[in-house]
């Protein structure tokens, strides 16, 4: 049954215009891990408005499963998460061969000086303080993924 589904998916992909398929490949996939609904909603709006393909989850436990399925180019993760904090999550991602090349960006409302060293040791490449400036968020994503968002 799985093979039939895979074949049907390939046929559906082949029917889409080549330009649409190329555009889909040229979009960065971003996984947002944020437990604050308001913050998540704002970041989702910003990222989707710029053309990024985004999935969002609210806790560190579910994030790992979603990351394995979604295969993001970049993960934006809050540090202070329920069920598994951002540091633990980053360490798990670094150990997973399927995800170890995923770029990691920490976002936090905690004092940056309290978690900077720990964030970099866990595998995060950048640490952004909340509230996030949209221009900074978009610039970091473009720098780390090589995928420019479309002009908004």
Image: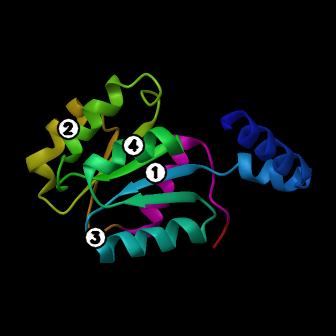
Residue drawn at (17%, 51%) of the image? 83
User: Measured along the vertical axis of the image, is residue 117 above or below residue 149?
Assistant: above
Name the front one of labels 3 and 2.
Answer: 2
Residue tagged by mark 1? Answer: 140
Locate residue 64: give its quadrant.
top left
Q: Quote the CA–CA distance across marks 2 and 4.
A: 14 Å
Q: CA distance from mark 4 to mark 1?
A: 24 Å
Mark 4 or 1: in front is 4
The residues tagged by marks 4 and 3 sit, at their Cα atoms, a distance apart of: 27 Å
Q: Position of residue 108 (x, y in %)?
A: 22, 58
Q: Quadrant of residue 56?
A: bottom left
Residue 88 is tagged as 2
* Precedes in sequence: disc 1 or disc 3: 3
Left or right of 136 on screen, residue 62: left
Q: Is residue 54 above or below residue 1?
A: below
Q: Quadrant of the N terminus?
A: top right
**Helix, strand or loop for disc 1:** helix
The residue nearer to you, when weighing 13 against 146, is 13
Quickly name the residue at label 3.
131
Q: Is the magenta region chiefly helix, strand or loop?
A: helix
Element at label 2: helix
Going from N to C along the chain, the mark reached first, 3 or 2, is 2
The range drawn in magenta is 133-150
Sequence order check, earlier mark of 4 and 3: 4
């Amino acid at each position: 049954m799985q093979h039939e589904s895979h074949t049907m998916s390939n046929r559906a992909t082949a029917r889409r215009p080549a330009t649409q398929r190329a555009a889909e490949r040229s979009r960065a996939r971003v996984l947002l891990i944020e437990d604050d609904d308001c913050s998540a909603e704002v970041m989702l709006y910003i990222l989707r408005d710029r053309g990024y393909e985004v999935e969002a989850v609210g806790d560190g436990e579910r994030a790992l499963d979603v990351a394995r399925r979604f295969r993001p180019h970049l993960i934006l993760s809050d540090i202070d998460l329920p069920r598994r904090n951002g540091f633990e999550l980053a360490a798990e991602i670094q150990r997973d061969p399927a995800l170890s090349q995923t770029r990691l960006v920490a976002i936090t409302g905690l004092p940056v000086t309290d978690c900077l060293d720990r964030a970099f040791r866990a595998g995060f490449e950048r640490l952004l303080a909340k509230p996030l400036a949209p221009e900074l968020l978009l610039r970091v994503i473009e720098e780390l993924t090589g995928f420019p968002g479309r002009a908004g």
